[in-house]
Image (cartoon, rainbow, N blue to C red):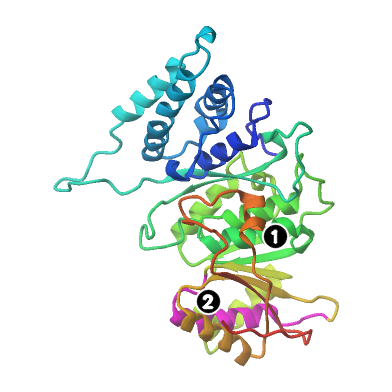
Amino acid sequence: MPARISFPEVPVHPDLFKILRGYASLVSPHHLQIPFHLEAQAIHDFFVLHILTSAHFKTYPPAVQYQKAFWKWTIPHLEKSIGEADPDLELEVDARVYNHYLGLLNFSGDPQAPGLTGERPPAESYITHFWRGDAEAHPDGLVDLNTYETTTLLEARTLVEGGTTGLRTWRAARVLAAHLVRNPALVQHTRILELGAGSGFLGCVVAALQLGSPRHKAASSTGALWLSDINDTVLARCRDNLRLTCNSSSAHPSTRCVFLDWAAALEPDPEPLASLLHDKIDADLILGADIVFDPYLIPALVGVLRLALQPRSHLRERSALIALTIRNPATMQQFIEAVLASGLILENLPPETKAAHDQVFGQPGEESGGDASSGVYIYRITSRPTSVATSAI
């Protein structure tokens, strides 16, 4: 297993854990709450031990802009909590908190391009997700951080960067990941292809589920994981995130990042693509999240699904799980109709609830903007004549 940076052994109160998860995933401080019902010393020590001096966050820190906002919000609350404590305790805010915040204020970052004024665009940032599928609690109700898996990514924080949307995690990927975490048998011992892998969030989670970890029962065999995209910059970022030593995915023995152009499925001779899909990748399960955002992509995507799902053995059923955010109902309906017209079978799985999602990943971060499961549908697509449940929006 990779040399994971351990978190402090000291368990934390669930209300403080919400703050930790929020900080790690760049939740706006305005959506966080200080649990003033706890002792001032406990609140203060949590911020120092689990955030300020955390080895993980020193190695994989949130962006400076976010840290500025976070500590600007935190310091007055710490001062308020200590100010209301028993004076005989002689509590005070650790000087390292103030020094760290002053250092952030003095950080200028990369020089602004000549002639540009105004606020800088958000910088890339490490984002860490704490997750697990069970609801097991610490005997005394506290949270042991080392019973959680973590997935850390370096991501863009703009909607489009370098001409691509693939350098950040989108809502549907979180929803599909939560579904797989709660149903790990779907990916264990399985050959998997992800379409439009982006920065690698879903791939990192699936790799951890395939591997097992010291925090889960180890799988007897890992399966294989192929992560595909059409943008070389995105693929490089995906590969780098998979290899971060804090991620379990860095120890996976069979992960590949591969260039895949869906348009090849529409060529007069799709044999080169068919050879890649059938002979090399040979996936049992195809995954995709937020990959239907423009109607012009639909024919090529459906063509890839038809090729990849072609049955090549009566002993193996191949299927796809595609999670899509409903932005334009007409585009979604066009996708559904194209899948059905191709002869594939489409089933709309029961929608994920906010409670079920939050149990796995906690409060959604910057990239989700509210209820992470809202407006996201997961479709199961197969080519075998199993029970059919077609559903339009």
- The image shows residue 338, relative to residue 116, as above or below, that is below
* Residue at screen point 30% across, 36% down: 109
In three-dimensional space, the C-alpha distance between marks 2 and 1, rounded to whole angstroms, equals: 25 Å
The residue under label 2 is which amino acid type?
Trp
Q: Position of residue 308 (x, y in %)?
A: 66, 77
Q: Is residue 178 visible?
A: yes
Look at mark 1 in the image and give the residue it sits on. 180
Q: Position of residue 19 (x, y in %)?
A: 54, 38
- The image shows residue 333, relative to residue 369, as above or below, that is below
Q: Position of residue 346 (x, y in %)?
A: 67, 82
Q: Tell me the SS state at disc 2.
A: helix
In the displayed structure, does residue 7 sit left or right of residue 262? right
Q: Earlier in the sequence, mark 2 or mark 1?
A: 1
* Residue at screen point 46% across, 39% down: 62
Quadrant of the image containing the N terminus: top right
* Residue at screen point 72% across, 51% down: 133
In the displayed structure, does residue 265 sit left or right of residue 347? left
Q: Tell me the SS state at disc 1.
A: helix
- Disc 1 packing (10 Å; few <14; some 14–19; many ≥20): many
Q: Position of residue 284 (x, y in %)?
A: 74, 70
Quadrant of the image containing the C terminus: bottom right
Query: CB of mark 2 within 8 Å of CB of mark 1?
Result: no
- Disc 2 packing (10 Å; few <14; some 14–19; many ≥20): many
- Quarter of the view holding residue 79: top left
Q: Which residues are magenta?
A: 291-313
- The image shows residue 159, relative to residue 94, as above or below, that is below
The residue under label 1 is which amino acid type?
Leu
**In-front residue for pair 31/233:** 31
Look at mark 2 in the image and give the residue it sits on. 262
